[in-house]
Image (cartoon, rainbow, N blue to C red):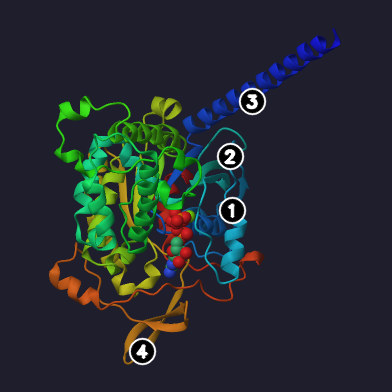
Amino acid sequence: MKPLKDKVKKSFLIGQDKAVDLARSAASSLENGVDRLLNRRLTLGVTGFSGSGKTTLITSLVHQLQHYSDALLAAFPPVLQDRLLGVQLSALDGVRRFPCQQGIEALSRGRWPQATREESGFLLEIKFRHPPGLLRRGKPGISRLYLEIRDYPGEWLLDLPLLTMDYRGWCAQSHSLFDRAMRQSIGRSFIEKLKSIDPLEPICELQLQVLWQEQLTFLTACQQAGLTMIQPGRWLHVAPSGDDSKLPFIPLLAITGCSEDQLGGASQDSLFKVCERHYQSYLETRVKPFYRNTFQKVDRQLVLVDVLKSLNSGPEAFDDLRFSLTRVLQSFDYGRNSLLRRLIQPRIDRVVFAASKIDQVLPDQHEAVRALMANLVQEARRRAAFNAIDVRCEAVAAVRSTTYVDYQGRQALQGMTEQGPGVLLHPDIPEQIPAMDDWQALGQWQLRRLMPPEGLQLMAGGRLPHIRLDSILNDLLGDRFL
Ligand SMILES: Nc1nc2c(ncn2[C@@H]2O[C@H](COP(=O)(O)OP(=O)(O)OP(=O)(O)O)[C@@H](O)[C@H]2O)c(=O)[nH]1
Ligand SMILES: [Mg+2]
C-alpha cells in the first residue's frame, strides 16, 4: 500500500510544482506584457553574420553602461544630462547567461571575446531619472527600462532564408551559387560529383554519409575564403558524428533537370525523398525554434555588417555578402508596433544598420563606409521605410583598436596586429558598390586583423575606447529615456 501512497504523494507534489511553475511563468509573461505596454521593456535583436562583431559589441555596450561615468557617451542624452543611475544584469528564463565577464576579461588581456557557439542572453535593467517637468506613476522622477538581448552564432542566421524555401528551391539556389567562380575553385570536384548524382536513384546510406561529410569540408572552406552565403549555416560547427549526422542531406544539383512528375512520383527511399525529409526535419528542429525564440519578439534591431572584410575579400565575396544580407533581411517582419500588437505580438519598429569595426580605416573614410553599407542594405531599408519604420544607418567600432600617426607625410593608422605593432595603410573606400576600377585599387589592400588596444584595465571599470557606440545607443534607445 505504501508505495502507491508514495506514488500518489509524489505525483501530487510534481503537479504542485508544475502548477507553481505555470503560475510563475504566467505572472512573468503578464509582467513582461505590462512592461511592454508601458514602453518599459524592449527586446533588442543584434543581428549579424559570423564575425560581424556582435559579441564584442554587446560586451562593450554593457561595459559602457555599467561604467557610464567614465565612458565616452556624449551622444547618449541620459549620460550627457547626468540622468543615468545605474544598470543591473540578470539572467533570462531558460537561456544560458551571456558570458559578459569572460569578454571583459579577454579584452583586458589583449584578446577578443571568443567566437560564439551557443545561444545566450540577459536582461539589462537601466535605472534613470527622467527629465524634469514630467509627472509619472511610481517613484517620482525615477524610471526603469528593461532591455532583453540575446547572442548566438552568426552562422545560424544564414538558415533563416531556408524557412521560405522548400528542398527543391534550396537545391536550385545551390545550383546557381555553385556555378560561381570562387565556389568552383574551392570545390570543383565535389560540385561535379553532386551534379552527377541522380536524385531518383535509391538511397545508399553510406554514400549519403560520405557526401555529407565532404559537404562539411566544402562549407568550411567557403567560409575561410570569405564567402557568406553558406547553408546550412549550423553545419559549419557540427560534430561529424553528432546528432546532425543522423539526418544528413545534400543539395541534389541535378534536380533542376527533373520534371514535377518525376519528382512527385519518386519512391520514398529515393535520394530525393530522403534528403527532402531530412531537410524538412532540419527546419522543424533547428531553424524554426531559433527564429521563434530569438527573433519573433524583437522590437528593435541592430544589423551589424562587416563591410570592410568583404570589401577586402574581392568582388565575388562582396556580392555574396550582398546576396546573403538581402535574403536574411527578408526574414524580418518590419511592421507597425501598435499598442495592442506590442502586448500580443511585438513588431520591429526601429532598425539600425551599422558597418562594424570602422577603427580599421581613417576617420575621413568613416562616412564612405557608412554610405557603402547603406547601399548594401538598400532593399531592406526601402521595405522598412515603406512600413513606416524608423531606419538609421551608422558606422561603429565597439572597441577602438587603432590610433592615428603621421607616416611619410600622411595620416595613417597604428595598432597591434597579430604580428606585433604596425602602421596600417588603406585605399579610399568607395561610397557605392565598387565598380571594376575600384576593385583594382582595393585589390592591393591587405586588411590585417587587429588585436584590442593594450593595457585596458576593464576589470577595475576602466574606459573602453569605441567609435560612435553612443550614437548607436541613442538611435536604438534614446526615445525611451524621454
Ligand atoms: N578592429 C576591430 N575588430 C573587431 C571589433 N569588434 C570585433 N572585431 C574583430 O572581429 C572578430 C569577431 O568579433 P565577434 O564579436 O566575435 O563577432 P560575432 O559576430 O560575435 O561572431 P560569431 O560569434 O562567430 O557570430 C573579433 O575576434 C575581432 O577580431 C572592433 O570594434 N574593432
Ligand atoms: Mg559572437
Depicted 355 relative to depicted 465: above or below:
above
For disc 1, the neighbor class at 10 Å (few under 14, some 14 to 19, many from 20) is: some
Mark 1 lies on a secondary structure that is loop
Depicted 354 relative to depicted 430: above or below:
above
Mark 4 lies on a secondary structure that is strand
Structural distance between the alpha carbons of marks 2 and 3: 14 Å
| Dot 4 beta carbon under 8 Å from ligand 1 | no
Q: Is residue 116 visible?
A: yes
Callout 3 touching callout 4 (CB < 8 Å): no
Q: Which mark is residue 407?
A: 4
Q: Which residue lies under the disc numbered 1?
A: 99
Q: Amino acid at mark 1?
A: Pro
Comparing labels 1 and 2, the label whose residue is closer to the camera:
1
Q: Which residue lies under the disc numbered 3?
A: 24
Quadrant of the rendered structure where residue 65 is? bottom right
Q: Amino acid at mark 2?
A: Leu
- The residue located at (23%, 75%) in the rendering is 443
Comparing labels 4 and 1, the label whose residue is closer to the camera:
1
Judge from the rendering whether residue 106 lies leftward or rightward of residue 12; answer left or right: left
Q: Answer with the quadrant where ligand 1 appears in the image.
A: bottom left
Q: Amino acid at mark 4?
A: Tyr
Specify which label sits upstream in the sequence, 4 or 1.
1
Q: Which residue lies under the disc numbered 2?
A: 92
Mark 2 lies on a secondary structure that is loop
